Amino acid sequence: RLAAFQTLLRHQDASSSADMETRPTAYMKADFANKYLGGGVLGFGCVQEEIMFLLAPELLVGVLLCEPMADGESVEIAGAEQYNLHTG
């Protein structure tokens, strides 16, 4: 339950000056699209969440390890590197 969450979060600045794919790796990236980590990346999905997971293939490990998230849950993955670019 979110109400039971006791850890304070660091201050975060929001910016719309760059898209998720070109933002430097030091920035936190958040996605709120799906209760399944990675959305349809291993199926037929091809929108922002799936593209983010294909650009940083290390994120795919989380798809295999994480159960569907319940309301109020989140998953944090740190240190994933982006290995490729895309257009379109």
Image: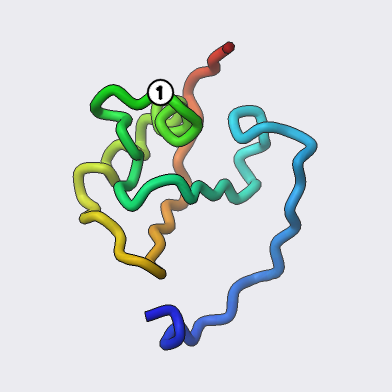
Q: How many numbered discs, if any? A: 1
What x and y, as percent, mark residue 11? 71, 68
| Residue that appears at 46% across and 52% down | 78
**Please, is residue 66 above or below residue 20 in the view?**
below
**Please, is residue 75 above or below residue 52 in the view?**
below
| Residue that appears at 30% across and 33% down | 40
Query: Label 1: which residue?
Result: 46
| Residue that appears at 21% across and 55% down | 67
What x and y, as percent, mark residue 15? 76, 46
What x and y, as percent, mark residue 73? 38, 66
- Closer-to-camera residue (44/82): 44
Q: How is the image coloured?
A: rainbow
| Amino acid residing under circle 1 | Cys
In the image, 42: left or right of 20? left
Quarter-of-image position of residue 4: bottom left
Which quadrant would the C terminus be assigned to in this image?
Answer: top right
| Residue that appears at 20% across and 50% down | 65
What x and y, as percent, mark residue 70? 30, 65
- The residue most toward the top is 87
Secondary structure of residue under mark 1: loop
**Please, is residue 41 above or below residue 25 in the view?**
above
